[in-house]
Amino acid sequence: MKILYFAWLREQIGHAEEDVIPPPHVTTVGALTEWLASSSPAHRKALTKRDSLKVAVDQTFARDDTSIAGAREIAYFPPFTGG
């Protein structure tokens, strides 16, 4: 699946996207975020404040308990405001 990072997440991790194959036990957005955070110090730092991140699964906003089964794209967004 493709993982996309936006704004300062992209800057902290060092790239805008990556292709990953999560292990079988990673079945939800929350588990994916934990798994990604364990992949490098940059990922860990960027994904630490999970409560403030927005995540979309195949372009639909999702929660930590959302399934990633069959997902093609997961996008991580920092907090944002309207205006």
Image (cartoon, rainbow, N blue to C red):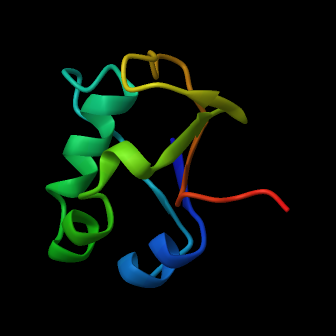
Q: Is residue 44 left or right of residue 56?
A: left
Which quadrant, please, contains the C terminus?
Answer: bottom right
In-front residue for pair 11/22 = 11
Examine the rendered structure and indicate whether residue 15 appears above or below residue 3.
below
Q: How many marks do you count on the picture?
A: 0
Q: Is residue 81 above or below residue 73?
A: below
Q: Residue at x 55, y 57 (%)?
A: 79
In which quadrant of the rendered view does residue 65 lie? top left
Name the residue nearer the viewer: 12 or 22. Answer: 12
Q: Is residue 19 above or below residue 66?
A: below
Residue 42: horizontal and vertical position, in percent?
25, 76
Percent position of residue 77, x then y: 56, 56
**Residue at (38% x, 26% y) in the render:** 64
x, y percentage for residue 63? 47, 25
Q: Which one is nearer the viewer's eye here, 71 or 57?
A: 57
Q: Residue at x 23, y 22 (%)?
A: 24
Expressed as whole percent of the image width and height from the top left, the position of residue 11 reads: 47, 84
Considering only vertical position in the picture, is 47 above or below 73? below
